Amino acid sequence: GESVGLHLPTLSVQEGDNSIINCAYSNSASDYFIWYKQESGKGPQFIIDIRSNMDKRQGQRVTVLLNKTVKHLSLQIAATQPGDSAVYFCAEKDMGRRALTFGSGTRLQVQP
Amino acid sequence: GAVVSQHPSRVICKSGTSVKIECRSLDFQATTMFWYRQFPKQSLMLMATSNEGSKATYEQGVEKDKFLINHASLTLSTLTVTSAHPEDSSFYICSATSLGRQETQYFGPGTRLLVL
């Protein structure tokens, strides 16, 4: 659901299930997208990235899908494990800037 | 590879004092370093972008005289919070990009600042 105030949207899944985390962006000039994982009290950890000339990219247990038509990005995690529990952020880079713009984040809770 | 460290990891200081946070790229040369702050349960907000040997570029609303950034070498950037106040209490995170991959940012572990 939507995040309101200080509450992160939370996705709760059972261990072993697949997880899908979604992100909407608004900048048509964004040409590079990254998913980061952040555990409590730690810095963001790079998961996977994708350029705007692609619509899908796969890593180990993770897949990123990009739909530029509707400005939507998703992260799929296969066979979710308890160690996947964290906050996940999407980030985008405008082709004219060096800096990233972060989304609001989604908390993933994996139930054993 | 692509390890970024920060020091200190946690700091508590009195209101009115200054605090310096270091960000180092350990195994690569960082062309650009970024400083973010993050409040509880919120996303990362970019504060400034710095290049080695030049002045930092601050985001709108970030006071450059309060948050001093120095990027003296290709492996070190520092953020100094001057005359800290309780509202400056936050999680400060740096990131760096390398010469070879200028789009991917590698993040440090963050510094928790508490101003009493």
Image (spheres, coloured by chain):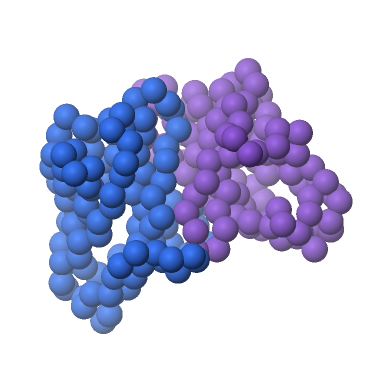
Q: Is residue A22 left or right of residue B47?
A: left
Quadrant placement of the C terminus of chain B: bottom right
**Residue drawn 65% across the image and 38% down it:** B62
Residue B101 % position (x, y)? 35, 27
Q: Classify residue B40 by image quadrant.
A: bottom right
What colour do you see for chain A? blue
In the picture provided, is A69 more to the left or to the right than B3?
A: left
Residue reaching furthest bottom? A112
Q: Residue furthest top?
A: B53
Q: Nearer the viewer, residue B105 or A65?
A: A65
Quick check: B106 above or below B99? below
Numbered marks: total: 0
- Identify the residue at horizontal 43%, vertical 51% (top origin): A44
- The image shows residue A87 at horizontal and vertical percentages of 39, 62
The location of residue A69, given as percent across then percent down, is 16, 39
Q: Quadrant of the N terminus of chain B?
A: top left
Asked if residue A87 shows in the view, the reply is: yes
Answer yes or no: is residue B73 visible: no
Residue A8 lies, in percent from the top left, at 41, 66
Image quadrant in which you'd find residue A61: bottom left
Q: Is residue B112 above or below residue A6?
A: above
Q: Residue at x 15, y 72 (%)?
A: A17
In the rendered structure, the colour chosen for chain B is purple
Q: Nearer the viewer, residue A43 or B73?
A: A43
x 47%, y 44%: residue:
B107
